[in-house]
Amino acid sequence: MKTIQLDLGEHSYPIFIGTDLLGRADLVRPSVRGHQVLIVSNETVAPLYLEQAAAAFRDYHSDWVILPDGEQYKTLQTLNVIFDALLERQFDRKCTLVALGGGVVGDITGFAAACYQRGVDFIQIPTTLLAQVDSSVGGKTGVNHPLGKNMIGAFHQPRCVIADIGVLDTLDDRQLSAGLAEVIKYGLIQDAEFFTWLEENMDRLLAREPAALIHAIHRSCEDKAKVVAADERESGLRAILNMGHTFGHAIETGVGYGRWLHGEAVATGMLMAADLSHRLGWLSAEDVARIDNLIDKACLPTRAPADLECDRFLELMAVDKKVSGGKIHLVLPKAIGESVVCGDYDPALLRETLEAHLAVGCGSA
C-alpha cells in the first residue's frame, strides 16, 4: 500500500492506494468521529462491493442507500434521496457518509455531506479509475443542472480516500479508458516525465497490470495533491486541473448526460485545447501529434460529436465556472508538461478550432 498525505491544514487527509483495502477497519477508524455511518452506493457497485466495504464499519451504527447508476442521475432530485435517508433514519451532525462508487456517487455524496446539518464528515471509496485519480481527491462536490455540468456544488474535503485497485477488475474497458483521460491530463498539464511514461506503458495500463496501475494512480494523486494543497478553492493555480474540461463539459451537456462518459469528453477537450494552443503559436505540431496519439492509444475519442454545431458549442462553453467577466477562460498547453489559464485569445481562433473538430466529428463516443 502507498499513502499520500494531502496537506490542507486542519482539512488534511490521507489517500491510501493498493490492493485488498476494502473492509479494512484500521484505515477508516481514524476518520470516523461519531457512531453513525451511511454508505451511499449505486445499483451497479453495491452488489459487487457493498458487503465487503461495510465490513470496515461493523463497529458503528451503519446503514446504506442505493442510487440509480449514471451521470443523468447526478441531480438535485437524487441528492434528496440521500437527505431523505439521513432524516428518516435520524442521523446526527456527527455522522459520516461513505461514497462507494465512481465519480457521480462521490460528487453527490460529498455534496450531501457538505449540506447536511451544514456539514458532516465523509469518506471516499472510489471504484472507477477516473474517481481514484481525480474526482475523489480535492474536495470538489456537486450535481449537474440541465443547462450546465457541475454548476451546483461546494468545496468539502473527505476525511480519507481509499483507492483499492482490485475493484478495477470489474470495470468495463470503456470506463477504464475514461479514467485514463484524467491520468493523461496530469502528464500534459505539469508532468512531462509522466507523459513519456504513459506513452511507454499505455499497453500495460490497458491490460490492468497491478504495478502499472498503482504507479499511475499514485503519480496522478501526487500531482493533483500538490496543486490542491497550493490552491484548495481554485483561486489560481488549481484551474490548470480543468484542462479539456470546458470543451468536455460542453460536449456532455450538448449531447445529453450519460451519452459520452466524462473522461471521453475531457480527452476530446484536451485535443481541442491543444489545437487552439497550436493556432496561437505555442504548441508544436509534433506535440499535438503526441497528444493525439496517446489519447488514441488509450482507446479514447479524438474528435467531437458530429451533431453539435459551432454556435451551440460556444453557447454551452459560456455556461461554465471558468467564465469570468464574460470571457471563457481556457486551460491551454504551452508544451507537454506546461499549461496556462488563458482568457486573452483571438475568438476567431477558437471558432477555427471548433469548426475543425466538429467538421470531422465522430458521432457518439
Image (cartoon, rainbow, N blue to C red):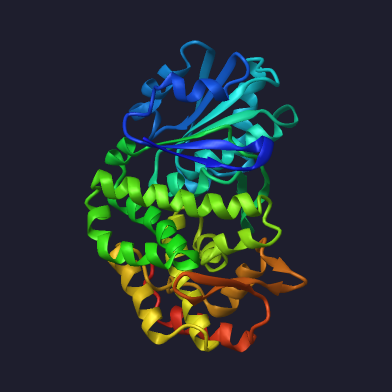
Instruction: Say whether residue 218 is left or right of residue 81.
Output: left
- Residue at position x 23%, y 59% in the image: 203
Quadrant housing residue 325: bottom right
Is residue 353 shown above or below 97?
Answer: below
- Residue at position x 25%, y 48% in the image: 208
Nearest the eye: 143 or 346: 346
Residue 328, image x, y percentages: 66, 72
Asked if residue 19 can be seen in this view, the reply is yes
Q: Looking at this rendering, what residue extends furthest in the right direction?
A: 325
Nearest the eye: 348 or 209: 209
Residue 295, image x, y percentages: 35, 67
Nearest the eye: 71 or 23: 23
How many marks the image carries: the answer is 0
Instruction: Say whether residue 129 is left or right of residue 82.
Output: left
Instruction: Say whether residue 205 is left or right of residue 228.
Output: left
Residue 226, image x, y percentages: 55, 53
Quadrant housing residue 7: top right
Quadrant housing residue 142: top right
- Residue at position x 54%, y 69% in the image: 247
Is residue 197 shown above or below 359?
Answer: above
Residue 302, image x, y percentages: 37, 71
Quarter of the image containing the N terminus? top left
Is residue 89 shown above or below 133?
Answer: above
- Residue at position x 37%, y 29% in the image: 21
Quarter of the image containing the C terminus? bottom left
Is residue 35 shown above or below 69?
Answer: above
Asked if residue 78 can be seen in this view, the reply is no
